[in-house]
Amino acid sequence: QRSIKFFLRAVHPNKAAITMADFSTLLTALTQPDTNVIRQAEASIKPMLKDPRCVAALLDIVGNPAAQNAGVRQIGAILLRKRISSHYSKFDAGTQAQVKAKLLEILQTESERSVRKGIIGVVGILTKTELATWPELFTFIGQATQHESADAREIGFLLLEEMSEVLGTAMETDEEQCKSMAPQINSLLERGLADNDAKVSAASVRAAGSLLSFLAETPQMDLYFKGLLSGVISVADRLKGVSEDAVGVTLDVLYDLTLSGCSSVMDNIEPVLAWTLSVLTTNDLEINLRDSAALVIAQLCEIRGKTVCKIPNAVHNIMAALYVIIESTPESAAGALFENNPMWLEELQNDDTNTGAAGEDDNFGETSIISCAQGTLDMMAISLPTKVVWPIVMQQTTQRIQSTNVDARKSAIACLGVAAEGCKDEILKGNILDEVVKCTLSAAADPELKVREVACFTLGQLAEHCQPNILRYSSAILPVVFQLLDDRQTTVQVTSCYVLEQFCERLEPKDIRQFLDVLVKKLASMLESSQRRSIQEMSVAALSAVAVASEEEFTPYIAHVQHLLMTLIALPIVGDQESSSTGGIMGQNSLRGRALECMGHIAIAVGKDAFAPYFTPVMTSAAQGLASDDTDLHEFAYALFANLAKVMQADFAPCLPELVPHLLKVVESQEGALELKEAEGAAQAQFSGLDDSDDDDEDGNGAGNYVVNVRTAMLDAKKGAITALGEISRYTGPQFTPYTTQTLTTLCTLLNTDADNNMSYIYSNTMLRSEVAEALSGMIMPAVATLGGDIEWTKGEANPAMTKPPLTPQIQEVSQMCLQALIVILKEDMDSAVVGKSCESMQAILELLGPASLAPVANECLEAVHSLLSGKAPCQESFERALLGEDGNGDGDDDLDDDLDEHESYMVHVMDLVGAMGRILGSSFAQYLPQYLPAICRWGKPSKPAEDRAMTMGILGELAQEIDAASLSPHVESVFYPAIQAGLADEDGNVQRNAAFLTGVTCETLGDAMSPQYMQLLQLLSPMFALPVTVSEDVAPIVDNAAAAVARMITTCPSAVPLEQVLPTFLSVLPLKDDMTENETVYGCLLTLLGSNNAVLAAQKAELLRVFQAAVADENVQENVKAQLSSALASLQ
């Protein structure tokens, strides 16, 4: 008591002491089960806590177990933690030493665990400033961790856990301190992990885990602490049934370490996978732990796929376990469409007739073990080589599909659907898709709802990811889906609409024509008769897809469908406050938005004249949505504006004065908001009214109490606004010109990569930058429209005055602004998707305006593209790529690499841009070939995926077609001819197809100079003519391009082709089945031979008649070609 009084006088010698009795009475009141009493106590104690003397009083209360009960002492510790940081710096050194000594004294003598943990929190706060001046603390921890009492040992490791961030920061920022501190801490943690007492070892796991997570991305992790991980896993495994907290901490650590790429996980990857799989498959554990285990497995597969595949049976064991999880869980496996829509879930839970997803599962909609298993399988299928994953999928599915156990059949079909996206390349090979579709359609007729549900889901996945091949099954799939629409279960009906949406939006009018009437009537009936929001929304979505597919043929149905939709877009808009009090009525807004979206799609389908009567009421409805605070309605409105601008074009212009400023305001808005940090832990959440934040800013401006919160809904709305601006500028013509400069400036601001000065870039994401990149190509269209919209340019001619009509200064200015912004993306952006979209936009601008637009930025553009081809652009040096082993320190090259190159799809757009520059520059591009060709060919190496090899053949063919013989000749022996040989002999059909194209155009460009190689080239092309076109749709394009190559060779140098041997085979594969762009080449060759009275062709008159007659009857053959063939037929008959 004397020391406390001395302490009080030292702080405020002229003030009366805050007595222990004062605090004791008020703290006791805080423990009462009476809200009013607690509020009154808080009001009384709050001013006392602003007085630095409260620290002494609280320490006296907490350290006096004889006078105070545990509850009061615990609250005292909580308040001490909340307030000590604002008072401690005001004490002199002697008083600070007394406070630190008193805290350690309490920890040494306190018997109540809750009070000890509270004081440990106070110690943790002080170590943020006192770590280097508190050697007694480390002495205390060392003694505690070796004490014979388990409670004492636990205190030591609880302190280490509380101090983990402070210790980690000290070791990360001070190398010398790290060298002295790290071995000591490592030794303490190893001792704790070896402790036989469960609570001590659990505390050591949490302490080690907190430190390892903090150090995950630092070199100190692997230098000093990598050996701890195996011990942490071992203890967590032992505690699986004792301390789920230790298991959770371990899983969090594994996730952090995996994401950071540190070697500790890679060195232990086999036991890590085995242990996480054991957690995932332990039914007695909480779902959040099993979900965390699934995330670790998925993350390892994504980042270290090749390493995972090298572990014997690892992939098989994980996937087999996932199948078993789904099979052994009786709940539905078709909840994917419902999981992110709370209103739909509520409907299902209230649906007495539904015995599937909601009817048999009281927790439907919450995180489930089935969704964990499906998510993990999805990531494995996407990330791992398909040649590893697909055979296991087939094996596990085949084992279960005929089972009498309904859940086994459910598991088989569900996993097939989940794997469809990642395994699509394998599914599309040979006859595999046939078997998959048959299997799925059979399951769709299963008597059990669980199986029909997942069959619907799988059909939707196939429709979404197996395009365009899946379309040839429309006559088999659509009737089955029609039947499923009549299923009495809501989940089946909704999922069937999803199938129709995915399937129909990719059909051509001729494909959907026979089903159109029944489809529209059925969906309209469902929309009209059902009161379930889920069925209504998905019916509307399916109608949108049907309209898009049928195009003008949807016009007869517009009156009835629009009548239904006009009712929906007039639904009252429900505000946030109203929706929360009316139980889910907010779904009404979503339905209204979906109907607006459907209106936009119908407009695109039927065209301007048919949609004109509905334009005004639809725009009015959209404007009403913008006046609400529902960002979803805003997003739907922006999508509608984009579509209607495309349809109405100049008639949309009257909306610009009000609409464009609104859209710009949305794009310019800051979507990041500063919000108070949430307190950590339940104890911290208590008595939040007594936090430091309630003081009158005692510590200055409150720095450190705020975090940036990104509002996803606002990002979606901004994306929609950017899309709308891009489409409006693209289609409304000269009327948009007054807004071009401001719009361009606003959009380019989002692309500014000066993160220190541009908050919008910090908080924007890939989605926004990608949308901006696409919109930029539309910004030039208003100026172009002033010239009539069509510009003719000459290959290689860079003078803007030589285009027809000449490029105006405005066009030149706007195009340069757009191109410069896009080039900056190529040179600086870290996201490959944004880079790919930028390449698409650049290509569109350059192909529209020609060489004159490229000339001012040619050097920058060519340099940026060359960096991408060379693999040296920032987006190719990203952190994820380094983890995949391409930095030379990862997994290395092996035969699995071909299928792991999932991040190169953007390179298709890069190659397309190269092709565009070749078309624009022509032979002027030849000066860049010595640098460009090696960079291009690196993507065609045998170790690269087939897609990369195919695009390499394609771009070489485009370049050979655009430059002259003199420019091409120096590179034939070193590049083009070896590429032709390799491509024609490749095992992949798309590579062969593009190599055949390359063969033909190279021969065509070089003329007689290539004739010495004709015989070898014909031998290489020969196997393609023997491919059975009827077996697979993938074969026809190969054969067509082989025929076109031979046609070019004959036309270019007929004397070098043995026509007696070649023509019969050549004619046998005609007419062309797929690649109609080669009609003029192929039939032009035959017409030339016919015109020269070639005797060999005359001997093939019957075959020639068959080919010409078939071509004339083919609706896909161009009219000018048909006219020439018809004339030739008349002379032949």
Image (cartoon, rainbow, N blue to C red):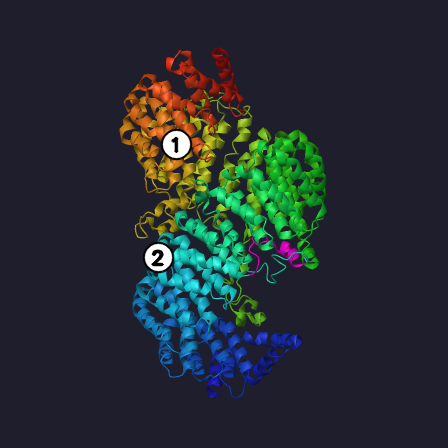
Q: Is residue 375 left or right of residue 528?
A: left
Q: Within 10 Å of the Cα at label 2, are there few (<14), some (14-19), or many (20+) other Cα atoms?
A: few
Tell me where residue 1001 appears, x and y as whole percent: 37, 25
**Helix, strand, or loop for circle 2?**
loop
Tell me where residue 939 appears, x and y as whole percent: 35, 39
Q: Which residues are magenta?
A: 330-350
Above or below 63: residue 231:
above
Residue beneath label 1, please? 994
Is there CB contact under 8 Å for labels 1 and 2? Answer: no
Query: Who comes first in sequence, dot 1 or dot 2?
Result: 2
Q: CA distance from mark 1 to mark 2?
A: 37 Å
Q: Is residue 332 magenta?
A: yes
Dividing the picture into quadrants, the one containing residue 1100 is top left
Q: Is residue 479 magenta?
A: no
Asked if residue 773 shows in the view, the reply is yes
**Helix, strand, or loop for circle 1?**
helix
Tell me where residue 741 appears, x and y as whole percent: 53, 35
Above or below 899: residue 1021:
above
Above or below 14: residue 731:
above
**Residue sitting at x 34%, y 21%:** 1061
Would you say the magenta stretch is mainly helix, strand or loop? Answer: loop
Residue 311: mark in rendering? 2
* Tag 1: amino acid: Asn
* Tag 2: amino acid: Ile
**Residue sitting at x 43%, y 62%:** 277
Along the viewing direction, whichever of 993 and 26 lies nearer the viewer: 993
Across the whole image, how many numbered discs are drawn on residues? 2
Along the viewing direction, whichever of 439 and 1034 lies nearer the viewer: 439
